[in-house]
Image (cartoon, coloured by chain):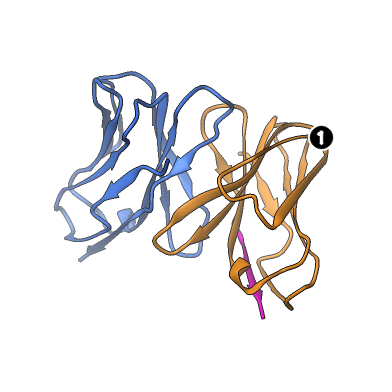
Amino acid sequence: QQPVQSPQAVILREGEDAVINCSSSKALYSVHWYRQKHGEAPVFLMILLKGGEQKGHEKISASFNEKKQQSSLYLTASQLSYSGTYFCGTELNNAGNMLTFGGGTRLMVKP
Amino acid sequence: DVKVTQSSRYLVKRTGEKVFLECVQDMDHENMFWYRQDPGLGLRLIYFSYDVKMKEKGDIPEGYSVSREKKERFSLILESASTNQTSMYLCASSLGGALHFGNGTRLTVT
């Protein structure tokens, strides 16, 4: 079952913050986050495995709630280079990385 | 760095043609995947392979088949292309953990 991502699109000014959410109706084994720039391949950002986990990658961090049904991606003090489409990918069980992706969140950072 | 190479960036085919999309990875990854990407729908899994000659159907396998004769190569086959298969096709590989994607093949079926 496809996870639900929100918002579908967001426009920011440089330096502003954003939160992207990814929700599932079932408890998950893991959540992956990827960013895809226009015309390029999706690039892995991070993976979360444990309920209550928080993980950071420079000014981009993510959390996984205790019930393991929701993850949020936090972009702090956004930069122009953050523009792109962000996807969450979810696994229901440990079955070889068979991810189901959300519909994506298109992020545009303006000067 | 892992490299996943898809043989064509753009393809234009006619309805009814048999189409082969090729993908090669250079990191000895066991798992390989084919996704299609359509606006608003994200990436949808077509097929997955966890070893040579092994394959599993993903969420949308209808109209597609796959072949994995060697560990590094995973092919997607459209037996009889149709216009609703016009899409961006992405190949990926993994060892468990992060997926590494190719740059995609944009297929247009006319």
Q: In the rendered image, what is the letter of the chain coloured orange?
A: B
Magenta span includes B103? yes
Characterize the local packing of mark 1: few (<14), some (14-19) or many (20 or more) Cα atoms within 10 angstroms: few
* Magenta stretch encompasses residue A81: no
Q: Chain of mark 1?
A: B
Q: How many marks?
A: 1
Which SS class for mark 1? loop
Numbered range of the magenta stretch: B102-110
Amino acid tagged 1: Lys
- Give coordinates of residue A12: x percent, y percent: 18, 60
Residue sticking out furthest to the bottom: B110
In this rendering, is residue A30 above or below B110?
A: above
Q: Which quarter of the image is occupied by the N terminus of chain B?
A: top right
* Residue B98 falls left or right of residue A45: right
Note whether B39 is above or below B46 in the view shown.
below
Residue A32 lies, in percent from the top left, at: 41, 35
- In the rendered view, tell whether residue A24 sits above or below residue B6: above
**Residue furthest to the right:** B69
Residue appearing at x 51%, y 58% in the figure: B37
Residue found 52% across the figure and 50% down from its top: B44
* Residue at the outermost front position: B62
Q: Position of residue A27 (x, y in %)?
A: 34, 25
- For label 1, the residue is B53
The image position of residue B72, as x and y in percent, is 77, 39
Chain A, chosen colour in render: blue
Q: Is residue B15 above or below residue B28?
A: below
Locate the C terminus of chain B by quadrant.
Answer: bottom right
Which is more toward the observer, B25 or B15?
A: B15
Determine the residue positioned at 62% across, 66% down. B85
